[in-house]
């Protein structure tokens, strides 16, 4: 019976893998994915919005297979699968005598929308989840009596996580908290290995520090302002929205189970062998609470931001259920219902992304962001072919993600930038290379003030056409752009480009 159950679980995992491979190949890039792909075409030590790892991963995979959707996403898909395997190995390291079966843990990870999204949509969270998982495994090896040299691997993984996303810094806080509250492991504060590991991490992270130093710490300043800028809406409503987002990405019933079994694990801390649960609690709940606090202080944290919390959280949930819950009928019934809901929800969402079929109004269907961009590329190509210029063309836009989609789907190797936020394009070549070229300009806002600004960059500015993406037969008016031809670029609007 157990063998049949495991076979069924592995079959489900394989089905999800096939669906994700199909999505990677067939579905257009999301705006954020296209934005990071643009980074990958211009490798740099770091970038305005985030550290560079997502761009490096895309650069390698597209070098191997070309600039198409599948190879843009392939590196992230491999990292996501790697993270799932490492999470199982961490569970086995922490619970060597009663580790839940690999099939069950991998099944749980595969039906989670959070881990599914990390494997499909390539953002900085994808490499972050991998390196957080790797660092967590190294930490688990250390606290379960492993060789002290694991600290050095932990330092490397921590540094690579920082190269992926700045929120990796929270990992260090979780580790310090664990060492403080675990009497059996406080001795590490008096050993050299943690400090050498920290030095290693900052050596690995040094390209980002060098880049920011050269750019007056522009990226650090942006992230601090973005995350903690106060918003004038009710704090309780913000907190409820944040918690609702966590329930959605984890699956509501599984999120409730995570909360319940966390309380059960806390009760077990009074026992003799509390280390594994203490470890998992300190690497999960502080992350959730950090983003809950940042939500109260500033903008609502996006649902995926606390994602690393559920790496330890998934292990905590499933190991605690195996140890304390599965013996009782009501717990088994609840977990079965939770897994069933998560499985159906995840399957429906992923199939809908591949073949939109759910009865959701197109304008509020979040998957509309993946569709319609290839048509924009064709329209831009038509404009350039109809009116060639000996000096060549580049693109301008008043929205960076739209610009990136246009660059990905327009034949030819063009560059472009959004003059409203020039700091985002510090990786581009010298602005003097653009002088006298023509530009295709994409404007969501074609007010007189906006036109006057863009007109100042060119000898002439003429409206050529407009483009409105369609999704399921309905026009997405909020994504409509007006297309202008700018003739004879004189400079300006690109103060953020490399000098």
Image (cartoon, grey):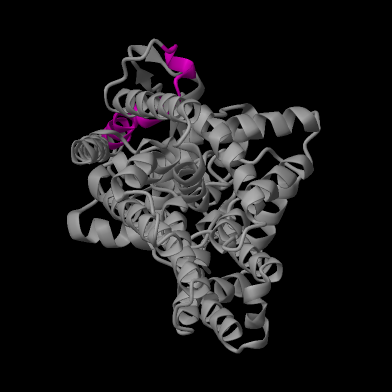
Q: Nearer the viewer, residue 411 or 319?
A: 319
Give the magenta-colored segment's residue range: 360-382
Image position, residue 23 (x, y; %): 26, 35
Q: Residue at x 61, y 59 (%)?
A: 278
Q: Is residue 294 visible?
A: yes
Q: Is residue 322 left or right of residue 223?
A: left
Whether residue 460 appears in magenta in the rendering, the answer is no
Image position, residue 61 (x, y; %): 26, 58
> In terms of image quadrants, where is residue 387?
top left
Q: Is residue 439 visible?
A: no
In this rendering, is residue 115 above or below 76? Answer: above
Q: Residue at x 27, y 22 (%)?
A: 355
In this rendering, is residue 388 above or below 128? Answer: above
Q: Is residue 292 left or right of residue 136?
A: right
Which secondary structure class fits the magenta region best?
helix
Q: Residue at x 25, y 56 (%)?
A: 62
Q: Name the image quarter holding the N terminus.
A: top left
Whether residue 370 appears in magenta in the rendering, the answer is yes
> In terms of image quadrants, where is residue 33?
top left
Image position, residue 362 (x, y; %): 42, 15
């Amino acid at each position: 019976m157990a063998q049949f159950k495991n076979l069924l679980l592995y079959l489900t995992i394989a089905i999800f893998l096939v669906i994700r491979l199909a999505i990677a190949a067939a579905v257009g890039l999301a705006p954020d994915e296209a934005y990071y792909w643009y980074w990958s075409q211009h490798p740099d030590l770091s970038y305005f919005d985030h550290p560079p790892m997502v761009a490096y991963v895309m650069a390698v995979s597209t070098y191997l297979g070309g600039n198409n959707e599948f190879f843009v996403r392939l590196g992230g898909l491999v990292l996501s699968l790697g993270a799932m395997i490492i999470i199982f190995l961490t569970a086995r390291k922490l619970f060597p005598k009663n580790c839940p079966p690999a099939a069950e843990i991998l099944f749980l990870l595969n039906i989670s929308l959070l881990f599914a999204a990390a494997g499909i949509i390539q953002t900085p969270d994808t490499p972050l989840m991998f390196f957080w998982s790797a660092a967590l495994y190294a930490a688990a090896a250390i606290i379960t009596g492993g060789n002290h040299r694991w600290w050095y691997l932990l330092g490397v993984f921590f540094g690579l996580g920082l190269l992926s996303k700045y929120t990796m810094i929270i990992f260090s806080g979780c580790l310090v908290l664990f060492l403080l509250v675990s009497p059996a492991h406080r001795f590490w504060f008096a050993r050299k290995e943690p400090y050498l590991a920290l030095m290693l991490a900052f050596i690995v992270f040094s390209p980002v520090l060098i880049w920011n130093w050269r750019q007056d710490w522009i990226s650090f300043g942006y992230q601090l302002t973005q995350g903690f800028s106060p918003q004038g809406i009710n704090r309780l409503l913000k907190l409820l929205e944040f918690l609702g987002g966590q329930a959605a990405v984890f699956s509501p019933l599984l999120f409730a189970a995570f909360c319940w079994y966390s309380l059960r694990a806390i009760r077990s801390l009074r026992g003799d062998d509390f280390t594994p649960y203490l470890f998992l609690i300190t690497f999960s709940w502080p992350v959730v609470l950090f983003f809950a606090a940042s939500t109260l202080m500033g903008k609502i944290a996006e649902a995926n931001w606390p994602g690393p919390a559920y790496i330890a959280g998934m292990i905590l949930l499933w190991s605690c259920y195996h140890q304390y819950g599965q013996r009782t009928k009501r717990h088994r019934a609840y977990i079965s219902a939770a897994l069933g809901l998560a499985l159906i929800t995840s399957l429906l969402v992923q199939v809908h992304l591949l073949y939109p079929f759910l009865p959701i109004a197109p304008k509020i269907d979040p998957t509309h962001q993946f569709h319609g961009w290839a048509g924009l590329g064709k329209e831009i190509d038509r404009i350039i072919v109809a009116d060639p210029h000996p000096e060549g063309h580049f693109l301008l836009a008043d929205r960076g993600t739209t610009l990136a989609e246009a660059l990905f789907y327009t034949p030819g190797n063009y560059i472009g930038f959004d003059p409203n936020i020039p700091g985002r394009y510090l990786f581009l070549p010298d602005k003097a290379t653009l002088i006298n070229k023509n530009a295709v300009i994409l404007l969501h806002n074609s007010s007189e003030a906006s036109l006057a600004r863009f007109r100042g960059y060119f000898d002439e500015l003429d409206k050529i056409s407009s483009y409105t993406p369609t999704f399921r037969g309905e026009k997405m008016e909020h994504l409509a752009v007006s297309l202008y031809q700018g003739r004879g670029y004189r400079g300006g609007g690109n103060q953020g480009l490399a000098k």
